[in-house]
Image (cartoon, grey):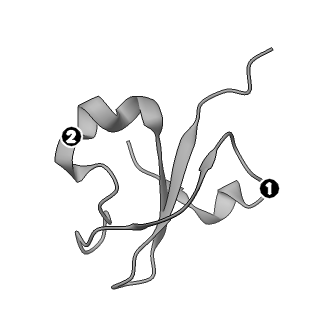
Amino acid sequence: MSWGPCFMYYHCPECGKKFKSATDMIQDLGPKFGMCPVCGAEGVLDKEGARTPDDADYEEID
């Protein structure tokens, strides 16, 4: 049984944006992985794993 993609969930300490990225995007995004898509600040990791009940609160970065 598969749980689907594994995500890393972040919030931005500068602008408050909530965002997530699938772990399989680490190689594609390189140093931009975990960085806020709005202001470019380094995100603070909230949690990681399969989709969570509050998944819709986080914008997916791809």
Tell me, for residue 25, which label it has, or none.
none
Q: Real-space Cα distance between discs 1 and 2?
A: 28 Å
Disc marking residue 53: 1
Location of residue 36 (image quadrant): bottom left
Tell me what residue is drawn at x 45 percent, y 36 percent: 23
Residue 17, position in %: x, y? 45, 75
Q: Amino acid at mark 2?
A: Gly
Q: Nearer the viewer, residue 8 or 16?
A: 8
Image mark for residue 30 = 2
User: Percent position (x, y) of residue 1?
Assistant: 81, 14
The x and y percentages for residue 51 are 70, 44
Q: Residues within 10 Å of mark 1 (few under 14, many from 20)?
A: few
Mark closest to the chain's N terminus, 1 or 2: 2
Q: Residue at x 64, y 65 (%)?
A: 57
Q: Residue at x 74, y 27 (%)?
A: 3
| Count of numbered marks | 2
Q: Establish if 27 lies above or below 11.
A: above
Q: Is residue 1 left or right of residue 60?
A: right
From this viewpoint, which residue is outermost toward the top? 1
Question: Is disc 1 placed on a helix, strand or loop?
Answer: loop
Q: Which residue is located at x 51 percent, y 49 percent?
A: 8
Residue 38, given in percent of the width and then of the height, sits at 30, 71
- Residue lying at the far left of the rendered structure: 31
Looking at the rendered structure, the kind of residue marked 1 is: Pro
Residue 20 placement, left or right of 35: right
State which quarter of the image contains the C terminus.
Answer: top left
Q: Say if 40 sits above or below 33 in the image.
A: below
